[in-house]
Each structure stands twice: as C-alpha cells, then as structure tokens.
Amino acid sequence: MRQQLARRPNLTLALIAMVIGLVLAWQLKGPRASPPVGYAPGDPRDRSVRTIEQLEAEQAALKAEIARLRADLEDYQAQAAAETDRLQRLNAELDAQRAAAGLTPMRGPGVAVTLDDSNVWNIPASSDPNALLIHDYDLRDVVNVLWLAGAEAIAVNDERVVGNTSAYCVGSTVMVNTTRLSPPYIVRAIGEPASLAETLRNPSHLIALRQKVERYGIKFQVAQVPKLTLPAYTGGFSVRHCSLN
Amino acid sequence: MNTRASQISTTLVTFLLGFLVMAQFTTQQRMDLKRAAASGADGALLISDLVEGNVRLRQEVAELGAQMTSYGSATNQARLQAMMDELERLKMLNGAVEVAGPGVQVTLDGPATVLDLHDLLNELRNAGAEALALNGQRIVASSVIAPTADGRTAVDGVVTHYPYLFVAIGDPATLETALLRPGGLLAVFSNSREGLRVNVQKRDHVIVPAHALVGMFQYAVPVK
C-alpha cells in the first residue's frame, strides 16, 4: 500500500490541492457571500464595528496599565513596610541616644544635694575668705561622687550635666554649661536614693568639702527624694571635628 | 528519492492547508463580531458594556495612582537620611562609636591625684574638646576617675597609672591656646607640682575609642 502510494504521488497531491482549492474558494467567497459584512465607510454599522474595536483596544490598554500599577504598588508597599520598620527602629535608637546625651528630661528617685556659701561672719581673720564660698571644684567633686555612686542623670540647679559640661568660677559665681549659676547650688541626681546618699556621706569622699563645712560653716545637705524631674540639656553640642573612624 | 520528494511536497502543502484554515477561522471571528455589531440591539449592548467596563477600569487606574502618591517614597527617604545623620551625631557625642579627628594630646607624667585628673578633664571640656579619652579609654559624661581600695587609679573601673595620656578631638590651635593660657590649670601643674611633667601636642589625627556602656537607665525614665 505504502509502495502504491509512493508510486502515485500525483494522485495524493491532486487530492490535497482540491481541498486547498475548496478552502481558498470558501475563504475568498465567504465575506462577499454573507450579506451583513463589508459595509461601506460611513455606514452606521461600519461605525459601530470601529467603535467596538476602539473600546476593546482601550480596555486592553487600561488592563495593562492596572497590571503595571499593581506591580509598582506592591513594590512600593514592600519598600514602605521596610522603611516603616527602619523608621521605628531608628526612632527607638534615637530616643535612647537622646536620653543618653541628656537631651530628654528624666524622672525618677534620687537625691538632692544643697550646697551654699557660709553665712558665718565671725571667722578668724587669718583664714582665707575663699573658704567661705562654694567653688567650681566643690560642685565637680559632688557630681563625680554622684556618678561614682551610680547616678544615671545629674543636674546642677537647672543645668543638666552632659558630656561637654564644665564647671568653672567667674568671680564669685560658678558657670555650668556656660550659664551663670548662683548659690544655693542644688545638685539633683536620679539613681538609687540610699546608695547615692550613702556614698556622699562616706568619709573617704569629699574630704575638702567636709572640712569647709566643719571649719567655715559651708552648707552641704543631702536629702533622699522619691521623685525628681531633671530638665533636658538645652545647650549646643559640637562634633565638627569628629568623624566616624 | 522519488518518495522523499513526494513527502516534502506533501508536508509543504499540508502547512499551507493549515495556514489557510487558521486564516479562515480568524476571519470568521471578525465576521461574528461584525455581525453582532451590525444586528442593532446586540451591538448597542456590547458597546455600552465596553464603555461601562472601561469607566470602571479608569477608576481603578486613578485609585491605584492615588495610592502610589500617598506613599510619597521620596520624602520618607529624606526623613530617614536626616534621622540617620542625627543618630550618627548622637552616637559620636555619647561615645557609642569610635571617632577620629584633629586635636591635642596632653601628657601628665607623674603622680597626679584623682582630683587633678578630673580638673584636667574639666579643663579639656571647657577648652572645647568634642571627644575625650584617657589612657585609651573613652571619657563620657558619667565617667569617673576614682581611687581603688589599694590606692591605685581607675578610669570607669579599669585600673591605670601615670603617665596619663589625654587625647582630645577639637580644633588643635584653640585647644592648645586654651590649655596653655597663663594661670590655667596646666600652668599651675607645671609651676607648682614637683615631679609632674606636662606636655601638650597638637595632632592632625587622633583616635578616641568607643565607650563600653552608654546610657543604661534603671531608675531614670524619660519624660515625654
């Protein structure tokens, strides 16, 4: 059979050609044969066909636009979620660093140390009148003993003690954070009240101050306070010369 | 050979046939649409459905566009950057990170007291030091130099001894001038302290290490 077919390819081709002919005929004839097709331009039926085609093209474009927007939005949302996450972590870190820098008012238990110049007038003429006054180093010594005792935040009057705080005398007043303070000086510290007070009263600390209290009537009082509120540092910080190493 | 030739021609012809059938089918689809459009009521219905559908699609596009703008990614980025800059500045201030810069080195060689060392720290802060270290340890606000039970000197609990090397970051000339001013602490040290040698050197680049612990609050609570 295969051999027979192979010997008569002309017959096979003829059959196929006939089918093609039929199809071609149908194809070419069809549009012309079926009556409601191939309207003349301007025919209202032709216009509606074109309207439908335009609307469908518009629909396809809109769908593509929506798909693109949804994909973009999804990217944005993922990015925004990551950013929100980062913002929250950054905010928490900033809060912690601001508090550590003394830029946040702090509340807690602690001690209030009052230091004041002597009001004793009948001291021996031979003694140094400076011994009657509270000096910058007296305040510094009290602040250092408080840090040693575990204080978490310290203020002198309303000046918060921060990393660049210095205390120095100008005439008879003390400058802290370049702000002029006048006596009485009240050093307030947040921490465990009993251990702060105990360390301040320890005779191995503040030896010079204790001597002035005994000899010249300088005022030095320590009070435990259940609730203190220390103000935030309001001065400037400079890191103009620092860079991360 | 003859068989091969007939197979090739059959294949070609079959391809052509398939193509024609497809073309016919596509044409037929178009015919259907056109017929539907042409048959009055159906055509109007199709058009109004398409118009309505496209209006809804356009609304969706507008809504998605509005959502996109509400995220305002550019502003967030700027805010993040500002916050990160501020955080870096605070960390440098607080001693949370190692910092470097120009500054001075102050050496105090001799048996200085703990109070002397605190006074010198005060002097350096007053002179405008931005970051401080003593014998390789960062000095922060709450740093304490204290004598140990056996009479040695400890910086934040770490025992050290003289020579004491203070490193300060800041404008070298300003720091030097402030430290060496007549009647200043260093002048007092070098004039009136037997066996205490004082040396100040400007430096283009010094390193101040990070502090081990920064801002640990147990009793203090931020006031909001």
Image (tube, coloured by chain):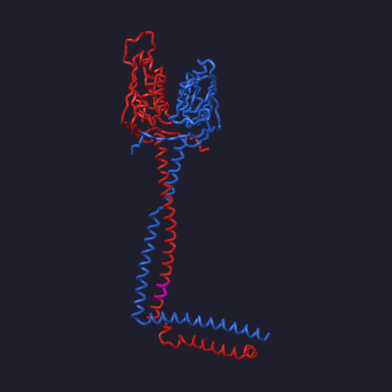
Q: Colour of chain B?
A: blue
Q: Residue at x 46, y 40 (%)?
A: B88
Q: Is residue A182 left or right of residue A22?
A: left
Q: Residue A172 versus residue A211: which sits nearer the camera?
A: A211
Vertical arrangement, residue A239 with respect to residue A25, above or below: above
Report x, y in % for residue A154. 38, 29
Given the current orientation, which residue lies at the most extreme front position? B150
* Total numbered labels: 0
As for residue B42 lying within the magenta part, the answer is no
Report x, y in % for residue B183. 47, 18
Q: Residue at x 37, y 13 (%)?
A: A129
Q: Residue B103 versus residue A89: which sits nearer the camera?
A: A89
Report x, y in % for residue B86. 44, 40
Q: Residue A106 versus residue A40: which sits nearer the camera?
A: A106
Q: Main secondary structure of the magenta part?
A: helix
Which quadrant, please, contains the N terminus of chain A? bottom right
Please identify the quarter of the rendering in which residue B217 is found.
top left
Report x, y in % for residue A230. 34, 32
Please identify the quarter of the rendering in which residue A134 is found.
top left
Given the current orientation, which residue lies at the most extreme right position? B1
Q: Colour of chain A?
A: red
Q: Residue B154 versus residue A143: which sits nearer the camera?
A: B154
Q: Residue at x 33, y 18 (%)?
A: A219
Vertical arrangement, residue A26 with respect to residue B122, above or below: below
Q: Which residues are magenta?
A: A52-56
Given the current orientation, which residue lies at the most extreme top position? A125
Question: Is residue B170 something that shows in the picture?
Answer: no
Question: Is residue A150 something that shows in the picture?
Answer: yes
